[in-house]
């Protein structure tokens, strides 16, 4: 959406941080309060929680590798699950500081259809690679960073950090790097400038807040496609062969809970802030606004009713598809309604290359 404000990008770069100050007249935007609401109620605090739980996880990994036992392992796996769920609260947003140095994909290298994470972690140990210095991490593969690598080291039997100290020390290094990355992104989100990530040409009409929110909505819509296609349809063989190992965080058994976290967040995004997207939509498109509100809630209800063993071998392919159909349909309905709504509100949403429905 490009509206109202006519400021050159160079001036905007000097004035507009991520947390926009509404008191400055040059920063006014029809979507200023909505943007600030999403940032202050969801994005910034969710990145903070992601950073805090990554720090706790790293400390737990250190303690486990100093004294490998079943209790310390269980505690580490619990804290891994906490950090994983915090990741689900920011996963939708591939925008801002997380886009630098492939950090978004480093947090989760998935789907890993060729087992690259497993092979590369094994190669690091086999070749006695020193992973304890910054030089290694400046050029390390995204497959050996973040949550995907931590899950593999914690849950793949071939690694077994309980009895193999070399893999435990690798786990320590991955955990520390992950902690540093989450902390850096949180700090950069606090201090960064919108104009670092959203660009207006000197002769372009628009305001940077509205354009940034437009980019975020695009990310939101694409994430809904990811949930439908990559998290649900592909692993259960919706259009092909079943491969449950392609489900997100399949080894740690957090595939279904992650989807529930995502859908719950969609409703929170819709209602974030005093002048939320929902409140703005009620003024111009009241019927569609209320319809979308109901659709998000319905999708979450359907997801919550899925059986805990949805991604287990206990169910047949046909059973899983029948269980998934209402959820995929509900998500598609909500996605189409969201797209229709934001288009009517003036946002220019580009082609969603992920959406196959």
Image (tube, helix red, strand yellow):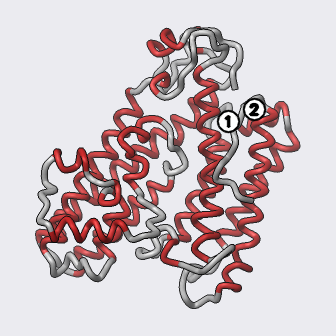
Residue 5: x percent and y percent? 65, 12
* Residue 215 position by quadrant: top right
Mark 2 Cα-neighbour bin, 10 Å: few <14, some 14–19, many ≥20 = some
Please state if 82 lies on the left or on the right of 308 as rendered: left
> Which disc, if any, is residue 321?
none
Q: Quadrant of the N terminus?
A: top right
Q: Quadrant of the C terminus?
A: bottom right
Say which of 179 and 304 sits in front.
179
Please state if 346 lies on the left or on the right of 79 as rendered: right
Mark 1 Cα-neighbour bin, 10 Å: few <14, some 14–19, many ≥20 = many
User: How far, Cα to Cα, is label 2 from label 1?
Assistant: 6 Å
Residue 157: x percent and y percent? 29, 82
- Residue 257 against residue 355 in the figure, above or below: below
* Residue 119 position by quadrant: bottom left
- Residue 126 against residue 211 in the figure, above or below: below
Q: Pointer 1: what residue?
A: 276
Residue 199: x percent and y percent? 54, 22
Residue lying at 24% horizontally and 77% vertically, measured from the top left? 159
* Residue 154 position by quadrant: bottom left
Residue lying at 72% horizontally and 32% vertically, measured from the top left? 348
Residue lying at 60% horizontally and 70% vertically, measured from the top left? 234
Say which of 254 and 25 sits in front.
254
Total residue callouts: 2
Assess whether mark 1 and mark 2 are in contact (beta carbons under 8 angstroms).
yes
> Helix, strand or loop at disc 1?
loop
Residue 30: x percent and y percent? 69, 21
> Which disc, if any, is residue 280?
2
Please state if 176 lies on the left or on the right of 215 as rendered: left
Please state if 54 lies on the left or on the right of 302 as rendered: left
């Amino acid at each position: 959406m490009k509206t109202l404000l006519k400021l050159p990008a160079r001036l905007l770069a000097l004035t507009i941080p991520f947390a926009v100050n509404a008191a400055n007249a040059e920063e006014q935007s029809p979507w200023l309060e909505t943007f600030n609401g999403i940032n202050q109620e969801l994005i910034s605090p969710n990145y903070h929680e992601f950073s805090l739980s990554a720090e706790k996880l790293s400390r737990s990994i250190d303690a486990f590798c100093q004294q490998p036992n079943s209790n310390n392992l269980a505690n580490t796996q619990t804290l891994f699950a906490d950090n994983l769920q915090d990741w689900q609260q920011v996963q939708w947003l591939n925008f801002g500081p997380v886009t630098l140095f492939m950090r978004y994909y480093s947090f989760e290298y998935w789907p890993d259809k060729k087992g690259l994470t497993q092979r590369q972690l094994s190669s690091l140990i086999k070749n006695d690679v020193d992973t304890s210095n910054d030089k290694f991490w400046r050029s390390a593969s995204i497959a050996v960073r973040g949550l995907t690598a931590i899950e593999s080291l914690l849950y793949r039997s071939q690694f077994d950090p309980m009895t193999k100290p070399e893999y435990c020390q690798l786990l320590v290094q991955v955990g520390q790097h992950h902690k540093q990355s989450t902390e850096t992104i949180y700090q950069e989100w606090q201090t960064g400038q919108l104009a670092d990530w959203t660009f207006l040409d000197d002769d372009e009409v628009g305001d940077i807040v509205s354009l940034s929110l437009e980019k975020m909505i695009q990310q939101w819509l694409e994430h809904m496609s990811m949930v439908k296609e990559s998290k649900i349809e592909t692993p259960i063989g919706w259009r092909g062969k079943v491969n449950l190992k392609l489900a997100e965080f399949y080894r740690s058994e957090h595939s279904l809970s992650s989807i529930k976290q995502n859908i719950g967040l969609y409703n929170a995004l819709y209602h974030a802030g005093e002048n939320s997207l929902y409140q703005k939509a009620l003024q111009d498109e009241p019927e569609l606004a209320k319809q979308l509100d109901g659709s998000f809630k319905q999708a979450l209800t359907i997801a919550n009713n899925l059986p805990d063993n949805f991604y287990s071998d206990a169910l047949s392919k046909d059973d899983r598809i029948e269980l998934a159909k209402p959820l995929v349909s509900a998500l598609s309905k909500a996605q189409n309604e969201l797209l229709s709504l934001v288009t009517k509100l003036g946002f220019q949403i580009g082609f969603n290359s992920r959406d196959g429905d």
